[in-house]
């Protein structure tokens, strides 16, 4: 219950400032205590007491050696940091996140929580956030939800993300997240969770023992709820005006639905879902066409593109000069103190942001070796689950037998969707490494995959080998 309650708090960015590492306040040079931190620490405390005190179980890191090395390199980067205090604060946060992932994996492996329930909470939270997004767009200002972490918003508020339509500034929807792009990533997670619930529900009722009339009535009721939820989340995605989310969401939706249409168990549900998504997207595109046309036009001279390119160029320069990193959490401060932002014409504090690419950001703070180990960890995590989704068909296996192995892998494929959504966002933004909701989203999905991988490995080892 504590774990599920914590999941509900992930979108809420309510926080208090506890320390500034520089004389003047700056988002990336300060320490905060988030409301979600309290539940996170409580959850970790209960997990440690239950697993390693009551049961006297020792934590095993042998299979998680990339995580151990990554932690070691992150700790070592503290000695290269301009602000040791900021680096220690960032390192402690990383330790908590990794412990959160490992704890999530363990309670999934032991059956204490179900991944289906996690996806349902993400889906419900996404619907709630999409409704807030619509109200923010309609009002063109914040809704007074500061106690949930909502930013001060308005089409005339400096620093609020906006688009210009016919010379009029239009506020992008934030939800209770610190930026529309973070909201967009979370809504995509909710959308793919809803896809899972749709496909799973249809397959479940097809295999039910009730009468056809009873099944039809239940399926109609659930379908109406899920259709409404999917439409609301799609509308919320439009109102974030996040081009990355539109592209990533479209591609992953296309690939996953094409995959499930070829599986007899999910063919009907996937076909209906495809038609529903096309119809909903078309309707939303017609209603919001003036805004979509403006946002869809990408120019290399627009500020969003220019700044991203500049931030990434700065990160590459830092990496070349500091291959061992400038200290975890210190990229922005290092750049300010060394006049790097000023060299790129960025004199205002609001322009001093991290590299908009988590891979460049990790390399600049933890070092090239740190990035390499992190990528090994992610690749190992993904590859370890490939056999569970069928892997590559062996040369002596028929295509039909291979498809049979893939038949019941809906849950794992959904988790893959969530992971790749975040990893693709990582190429164009920094929130997965720097902002509380983004970090929690990433390490939650990593924890789920570790849990699935461990459970799958256990089942494999328990099975007798085929002769």
Image (spheres, rainbow, N blue to C red):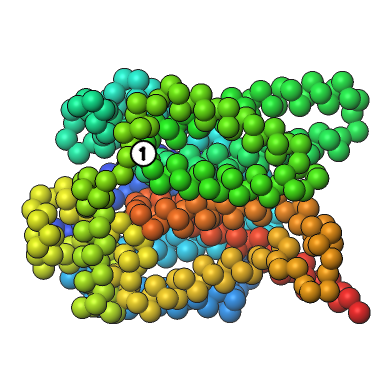
Q: Nearer the viewer, residue 323 or 317?
A: 317
Query: Is 298 drawn above or below residue 79 in the view shown?
Result: above
The residue sitting at 58% across, 67% down in the picture is: 381
Picture coordinates of residue 202, whole percent (x, y) = 76, 35
Q: Nearer the viewer, residue 197 or 3?
A: 197
259 or 158: which is nearer to us? 259
Who's the residue at 20% across and 39% down the image? 159
Q: Residue at x 31, y 64 (%)?
A: 361
Determine the residue positioned at 17% across, 54% down.
Answer: 352
Residue 467 visible from this viewpoint: yes
Residue 138 is situated, as x and y percent measured from the top left of the image, at 35, 20
Disc 1 marks which residue? 296
Circle count: 1
Q: Is residue 87 visible?
A: no
Q: Where's the C terminus, which quadrant? A: bottom right
Instruction: Give the side of residue 384 with respect to residue 17, left or right.
Output: right
Give the quadrant of residue 13: top left
Left or right: 395 in relation to 228: right
**With respect to residue 312, does 301 lie above or below?**
above
Q: Nearer the viewer, residue 307 or 236?
A: 307
Mark 1, residues whose alpha carbon is within 10 Å: few (<14), some, or many (≥20)?
few
Picture layout, residue 335 above or below residue 152: below
Q: Quarter holding the N terminus?
A: top right
Q: Position of residue 122 (x, y in %)?
A: 54, 41
Q: Position of residue 95 (x, y in %)?
A: 42, 65
């Amino acid at each position: 219950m504590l774990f599920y309650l914590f999941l509900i708090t992930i979108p809420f960015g309510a926080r208090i400032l506890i320390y500034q590492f520089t004389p003047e306040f700056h988002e990336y040079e300060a320490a905060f205590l988030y409301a979600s931190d309290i539940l996170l620490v409580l959850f970790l405390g209960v997990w440690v007491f239950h697993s390693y005190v009551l049961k006297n179980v020792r934590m095993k890191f042998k299979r998680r050696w990339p995580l151990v090395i990554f932690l070691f390199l992150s700790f070592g980067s503290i000695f290269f940091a301009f602000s040791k205090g900021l680096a220690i604060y960032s390192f402690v946060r990383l330790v908590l996140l990794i412990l959160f992932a490992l704890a999530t994996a363990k309670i999934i492996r032991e059956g204490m929580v179900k991944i289906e329930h996690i996806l349902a909470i993400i889906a419900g939270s996404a619907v709630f956030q999409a409704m807030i997004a619509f109200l923010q767009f309609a009002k063109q200002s914040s809704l007074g939800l500061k106690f949930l972490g909502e930013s001060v918003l308005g089409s005339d508020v400096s620093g609020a993300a906006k688009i210009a339509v016919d010379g009029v500034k239009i506020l992008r929807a934030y939800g209770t997240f610190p930026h529309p792009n973070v909201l967009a990533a979370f809504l995509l997670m909710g959308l793919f969770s809803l896809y899972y619930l749709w496909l799973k529900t249809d397959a479940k009722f097809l295999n039910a023992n009730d009468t056809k009339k009873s099944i039809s009535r239940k399926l109609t009721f659930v379908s109406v709820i899920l259709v409404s939820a999917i439409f609301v989340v799609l509308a919320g995605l439009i109102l974030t005006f996040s081009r990355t989310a539109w592209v990533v969401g479209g591609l992953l939706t296309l690939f996953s639905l094409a995959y499930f249409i070829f599986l007899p168990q999910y063919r009907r549900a996937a076909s209906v879902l495809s038609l529903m998504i096309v119809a909903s997207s078309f309707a939303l595109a017609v209603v919001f066409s003036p805004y979509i046309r403006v946002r869809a036009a990408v120019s290399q001279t627009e500020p969003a593109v220019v700044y991203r390119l500049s931030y990434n160029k700065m990160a590459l320069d830092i990496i070349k000069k500091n291959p061992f990193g400038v200290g975890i959490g210190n990229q922005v401060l290092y750049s300010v103190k060394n006049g790097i932002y000023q060299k790129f014409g960025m004199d205002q504090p609001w322009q001093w942001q991290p590299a908009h690419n988590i891979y460049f950001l990790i390399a600049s703070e933890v070092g090239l070796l740190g990035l390499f180990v992190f990528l090994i960890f992610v690749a190992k995590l993904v590859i370890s689950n490939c056999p569970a989704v069928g892997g590559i068909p062996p040369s002596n296996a028929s295509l039909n037998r291979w498809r049979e192995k893939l038949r019941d892998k809906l849950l794992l494929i959904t988790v893959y969707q969530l992971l790749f959504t975040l990893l693709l966002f990582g190429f164009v933004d920094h929130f997965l490494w720097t902002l509380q909701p983004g970090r929690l989203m990433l390490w939650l999905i990593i924890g789920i995959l570790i849990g699935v991988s461990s459970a799958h490995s256990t089942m494999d080892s328990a099975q007798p080998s085929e002769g």
